[in-house]
Image (cartoon, grey):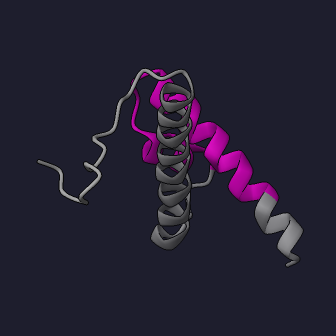
Amino acid sequence: MTDGVRKEILARMLEIAEQAIEAGENYEAAIRQRFPDVPTDVLTEVWLEIEDNKTERWWQKMERRVASNLIEFPHPKENGTKD
């Protein structure tokens, strides 16, 4: 099987998972309904992608806040201390 086909299948599983999560359903069950014999390792790949996407959205949110000065970070004093 080519790498491209695997990526397409994983992308479809991720799409199914995201729709299930959005609907408040179990994403693993939703994937297994469409791919009954899916190995646990493949479900783990989908879960990792879901978590990576969450992390990326969080970082983007933080970057927007910093860019718009909504978050202030403590700055050390000139002598290098935080006091």
Q: Position of residue 34 (x, y in %)?
A: 62, 45
Q: Quadrant of the N terminus?
A: bottom right
Residue 54's place in the image compared with 41, above or below, is above
Left or right of residue 15, residue 51 in this image: left
The quarter of the picture where residue 2 lies is: bottom right
| Residue 19 vs residue 63, the one in the foreground | 63
| Residue 46 vs residue 81, the one in the foreground | 81
Q: Could you tell me what secondary structure mostly forms the magenta stretch?
A: helix
Left or right of residue 48, residue 12 in this image: right
Residue numbers of the magenta segment: 8-34
Q: Is residue 31 magenta?
A: yes
| Residue at x 54%, y 36% (from the top left corner) | 63
Q: Is residue 6 magenta?
A: no
| Residue at x 61%, y 38% (from the top left corner) | 16
How many numbered marks have been drawn onto this rendered protein structure?
0
| Residue at x 47%, y 38% (from the top left corner) | 58
Left or right of residue 16, residue 48 in this image: left
| Residue at x 18%, y 57% (from the top left corner) | 81
Q: Position of residue 71 (x, y in %)?
A: 38, 28
Q: Position of residue 57 (x, y in %)?
A: 54, 37
Identity of the residue furthest to the left in this view = 83
Q: Position of residue 24 (x, y in %)?
A: 39, 24
Residue 77's place in the image compared with 25, above or below, is below
Identity of the residue furthest to the bottom in this view = 1
The quarter of the picture where residue 49 lies is: bottom right
